[in-house]
Image (spheres, helix red, strand yellow):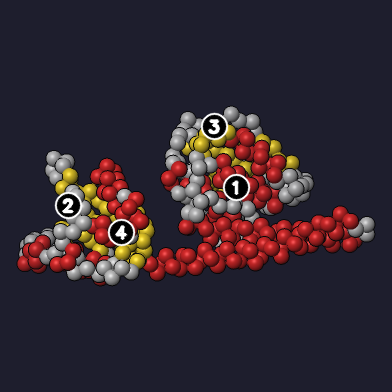
Amino acid sequence: MEGDHAWRPGLDQEALERADWTSQVKDYAIIRLDRDGLVLSWNTGAELVKGYSREEILGRSFEVFYPPEDRESGVPRQLLAAAEHHGRAEHQGWRLRRDGVRFWGDVVITAVRGDAGELLGFVKVTRDLTEQHRLERSRQQFIAGVTHDFRSPLTSIEGYAAMLAGELTDPVLGDFASRVRSNALRLMKLVDLMVEHCHLPAGAVALNPEPVALATVLRTVVDDLSTTVQGHEVTLQDTDVVLPADATALARVFTNLIGNAAKYSPPGTRVDVLVERGEQVVDVVVADRGRGIDPADRDTIFDEFVRGRRAHDDGGFGLGLSVVRSLVEQHGGSVRIDDGRFGGTDVTVRLPLAGVLTPADGAGLQTAQG
């Protein structure tokens, strides 16, 4: 029938079915292993990444790809056992080429089972990420250097300014010293935020989930912010909510949100922290009476380096809310912005009451100030 484009198998389809697809993949080493970890197949990518020819490696144990320290500690066997138990195992670390040169490999091992569920063997896929690993190490070294080179002089400036502010009797000079100290502290916070934000994608510090009393976290945050929110009354709603979370990460989330609420509100106004508990989640609402966030910015305000059109010249890099969103999502939660019930802005952090974190999540803990 003219115009009938229904698919029909043909010579091209038969050729595709006969072709050995994996042997032609060059960017990934794709290897089939038997149940004992012996190599059964070897694609072009495996030869390029690992340096062995097919004839040299078929029938040998995949343990030859691992450095001596990993073989001695049982890493290859542990990965096979994990893949058999969980269906797959993933690992990053140093691997060995045939010539003894090490490369940084990202490895995924998947268990292959028959129709009756019996283990047939494994498929092992390896990527060479040596260049990315080198760049990440260089980035971390650069961040460490920036942290030291900026924080050391700023700490000295802040210390001397604090001493002068306490000693000077001339009110004008005392005010100048206080301003110097205030700006030094502000720069220190901005440096901390930039450094911690750079660590965020790398997951540098693992979350440590445990039962956390929400009221304790919020009270601690408000106490720690006493100087930052001067001129504002912060009210906390009583709550007995206990949830699985990393207390330090939550503290940094609410340090950012409460600090921002005060920063963008007129002096003398109140900031309310409200807790609304549901059956499976708890909402923590930071409600201010400030200038609000333009509705046109709400879809992007949590993105990196976005500050919003009403931010004016208040300082900051537009990273704080981005870090807040990341930390909240790592807890399995969400964050949103609504028109304020008191005329300003409501920022709602929704967190699950059931456990969603494990110590192995490896998500990054970040300072969320600014």
Residue behind mark 2: 34
Residue carrying label 1: 252
> Which quarter of the figure is the C terminus placed in?
bottom right
Return the disc, 3 or 4, that comes first in the chain's sequence.
4
Name the residue that disc number 3 marks.
242
Cα gap from disc 2 to disc 1, whole angstroms: 48 Å
Q: Earlier in the sequence, mark 2 or mark 4?
A: 2
Q: Residue at x 55, y 67 (%)?
A: 142
Please tell me whether mark 3 sits on a helix, a strand or a loop. Answer: strand
Spatial separation of the CA atoms under disc 1 and disc 4:
40 Å
Q: Which residue is mark 4?
A: 66
- Identify which amino acid the numbered label 2 is placed on: Asp
Mark nearer the N terminus (3 vs 2): 2
Q: Quadrant of residue 215?
A: top right
Q: Secondary structure at mark 4?
A: loop
Q: What amino acid is at disc 3?
A: Val
